[in-house]
Image (spheres, rainbow, N blue to C red):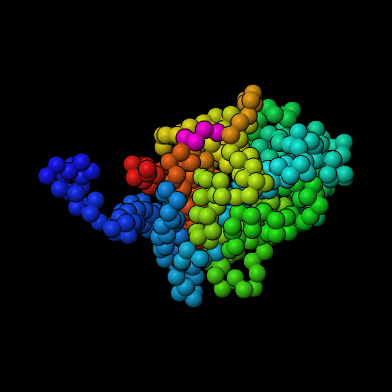
């Protein structure tokens, strides 16, 4: 008998497997791929625990490693809360796009429209888009120590002097995205945390993602570990919520990536918000800067991904080129973002055209190149499996 759907005995056997067996087989294959990339990293950098999640074709797979707390011997699960660090900036970007989708603000406006104490200051020459893309003119990576506390932000911005005109250079900056988020909340007539937790996160279907971890979720909150292997958690700081303050689980983060890969199930405003974060505005070296997410044409080489996530991209001013006609990036684009706090290290990427997303959440800071290499290796092996 001639078989048209299964041309070899191996394929014939596979075709006869029930759907659940196919899913189980694929999950086992994904776990093996993730194991080969993650276990050596954890061993090399003495990472206590890691939650890895993969989505491919809309199906999530969770692979958990080690401990959320060494002291309490608590295992990591997909429901363990980790600090996201600067991956929080993608949420800030989404909130801004959500506000614009509702007509509450325009990215061409200036912060002084919503934060009247800054009207006429040097930073008010930058637009909200400049703040969101770190192109305001030389805002630093961190707030100076004497201003790095809540309620000192306005004082800092009133005395700040730019190094360049807006739109000329990219300086990756917590004060920049922090001020953007603060202005967005003001445009929404809300506290930033309330706007995020009560307006945006529920629309994205995220029920275990927080700025302020509630008492009911604190048992799930991992301890981070610093370079001395002491348990730590993030400290309050200037615009911490806007720049690096979100805590989430692998289960919620994979939902977030799935919403970015296919936002069609979201309501109209949330869908426009997600699409808004997929618009590229400035070319900056190896990558294109959007709202929180950083973009690369896919497929992308490991070398280019490492270059775009290098320490130089974080710490040095980079000349930028404004994209003449900003538009939602093609489906075959890789979006990514790293994030760290004093005791946590995270990385997330997704490629809508391949329907693949990867989240790696760890309760110890380890080098960005190790994260990029591990995720790229996983992606390269997952890509042929995508439909």
Query: Is 195 positioned to the left or the right of 26 in the image?
Result: right
Q: Main secondary structure of the magenta part?
A: loop
Q: Quadrant of the C terminus?
A: top left
Residue 308 in percent (x, y) is at 51, 36
Residue lying at the far front of the rendered structure:
1
Residue 165 in percent (x, y) is at 74, 28
| Image point (63%, 39%), residue name | 276
**Residue 328 sits above or below residue 240 on the image:** above
Query: Is 12 positioned to the left or the right of 33 in the image?
Result: left
Residue 123 in percent (x, y) is at 79, 37
| Image point (71%, 39%), residue name | 131
**Residue 118 sits above or below residue 145 on the image:** above
Q: In the depicted view, which residue is nearer to us: 67 or 94?
A: 94
Q: In the depicted view, which residue is nearer to us: 136 or 204?
A: 204
| Image point (43%, 41%), residue name | 354
Task: Give the image quarter of residue 319.
Answer: top right
Tell me if I can see residue 96 in this picture: no
Asked if residue 330 is among those painted magenta in the image, a careful observer would answer yes
Residue lying at the far top of the rendered structure:
324
Residue 137 in percent (x, y) is at 72, 33
Task: Give the image quarter of residue 288.
Answer: top right
Q: Quadrant of the N terminus?
A: top left
Magenta region: 329-333
Asked if residue 166 is among those painted magenta in the image, a careful observer would answer no
| Image point (42%, 34%), residue name | 299
Task: Give the image quarter of residue 282.
Answer: top right
Residue lying at the far bottom of the rendered structure:
72
Tell me if I can see residue 279 in this picture: yes
């Amino acid at each position: 008998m001639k078989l048209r759907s299964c041309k070899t005995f191996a394929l014939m056997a596979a075709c006869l497997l029930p759907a659940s067996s196919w899913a189980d087989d694929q999950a086992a294959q994904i776990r093996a791929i993730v194991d080969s990339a993650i276990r050596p990293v954890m061993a090399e950098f003495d990472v206590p625990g890691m939650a890895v999640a993969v989505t491919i074709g809309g199906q999530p797979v969770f692979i958990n490693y080690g401990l959320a707390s060494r002291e309490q011997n608590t295992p990591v699960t997909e429901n363990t809360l980790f600090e996201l660090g600067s991956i929080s900036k993608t949420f800030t970007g989404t909130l801004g796009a959500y506000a614009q989708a509702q007509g509450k603000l325009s990215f061409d406006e200036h912060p002084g429209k919503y934060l009247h104490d800054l009207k006429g200051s040097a930073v008010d020459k930058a637009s909200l888009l400049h703040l969101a893309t770190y192109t305001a003119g030389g805002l630093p990576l961190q707030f100076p120590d004497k201003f790095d506390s809540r309620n000192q932000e306005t004082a800092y911005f009133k005395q700040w002097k730019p190094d360049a005109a807006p739109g000329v250079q990219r300086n990756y900056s917590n004060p920049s995205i922090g001020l953007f988020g603060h202005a967005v909340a003001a445009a929404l007539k809300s506290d930033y945390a309330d706007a995020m937790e009560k307006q945006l996160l529920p629309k994205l279907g995220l029920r275990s993602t927080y700025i302020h971890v509630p008492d009911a979720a604190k048992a799930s909150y991992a301890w981070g570990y610093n370079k001395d292997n002491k348990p730590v958690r993030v400290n309050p700081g200037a615009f911490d919520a806007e720049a690096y303050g979100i805590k989430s689980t692998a289960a919620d983060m994979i939902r977030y990536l799935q919403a970015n890969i296919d936002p069609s199930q979201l309501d109209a405003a949330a869908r426009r918000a997600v699409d808004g974060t997929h618009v590229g505005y400035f070319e900056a070296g190896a990558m294109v800067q959007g709202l929180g997410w950083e973009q690369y044409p896919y497929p992308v080489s490991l070398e280019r991904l490492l270059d775009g996530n290098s320490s130089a991209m974080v710490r040095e001013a980079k000349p930028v080129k404004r994209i003449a006609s900003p538009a939602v990036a093609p489906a075959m684009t890789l979006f990514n973002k790293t994030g760290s706090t004093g005791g946590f290290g995270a990385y997330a990427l997704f490629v809508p055209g391949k329907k693949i997303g990867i989240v790696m959440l760890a309760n110890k800071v380890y080098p960005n190149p190790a994260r990029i290499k591990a995720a790229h290796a996983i992606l390269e092996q997952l890509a042929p499996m995508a439909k």
